[in-house]
Amino acid sequence: MYKTDSAQKGKPRMKDTPNAIAIPCKIDRKTFTRFAVYDTLIRKKGWRNPVLFALIMSAFAAVCFFVRKTHAQATLLGGVLLGVGLVLPIVWFGMFFASVRRQAKRSGLSPDTVQYTVTLSDAKIHVSKGKEAADFQWQNVHLARREKGCIYLYVSPARAFLLPDCEETDRAWQLITAKLDPAKIENKA
């Protein structure tokens, strides 16, 4: 997951940087679920395919119901199309939320456990987990979104770090907004 710096030997590199903000990320299941809903359904617009499928199937069902007097079995076919059009999207959303719950359980998310530590400085973003660490440059950050209770820091379009609210949240958000282009910032808190 992270590149390990052999010279570092698991110690946070940025402790000596005076303006560095270290955030121990304690992520609970509720925070992770809210992030997954935002990331998959809103940001990636994952809701569109199931809803579009439901609309198309409902339109076909409406046509069948409209011609039921002139075509035998049109009502039955319309009912089947409408049922499939409504049930499959419901199943898809149910499977999505079940998958999020399984992933949160597998990850051992708890408000008492630090998943990783994100250290923000003027120069870079440093993420460490145990002996593993990775650095990211501010100019490569894709998006920073502040939600109630958490900051989603996308270091690439496909990779985000969750920074749950803590003592340093306001300072961290100030640094993030100072370092990023305003087009890459969303404040929904």
Image (spheres, helix red, strand yellow):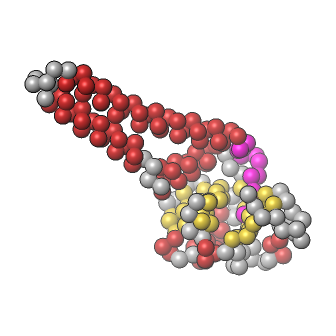
Q: Is residue 70 visible?
A: yes
Numbered disc total: 0
Residue 117 appears at what percent x and percent y?
Answer: 75, 60
In which image quadrant can residue 153 be found? bottom right
Q: Secondary structure of the magenta portion, mostly?
A: loop
Q: Is residue 158 above or below residue 174?
A: above
Q: Is residue 81 above or below residue 23?
A: above
Q: Magenta segment: does it hold 159?
A: no
The residue depicted at 39 percent of the width and 30 percent of the height is 87
Q: Is residue 7 above or below residue 165?
A: below
In which image quadrant can residue 128 be found? bottom right
The residue depicted at 13 percent of the width and 29 percent of the height is 67
| Residue closest to the far front | 72
Q: Magenta segment: does it hold 110?
A: yes
The residue depicted at 87 percent of the width and 65 percent of the height is 11
Residue 121 appears at what percent x and percent y?
Answer: 72, 75
Q: Which residues are magenta?
A: 107-118
For the N terminus, which image quadrant? bottom right
Q: Is residue 137 above or below residue 62?
A: below
Residue 46 appears at what percent x and percent y?
Answer: 45, 49
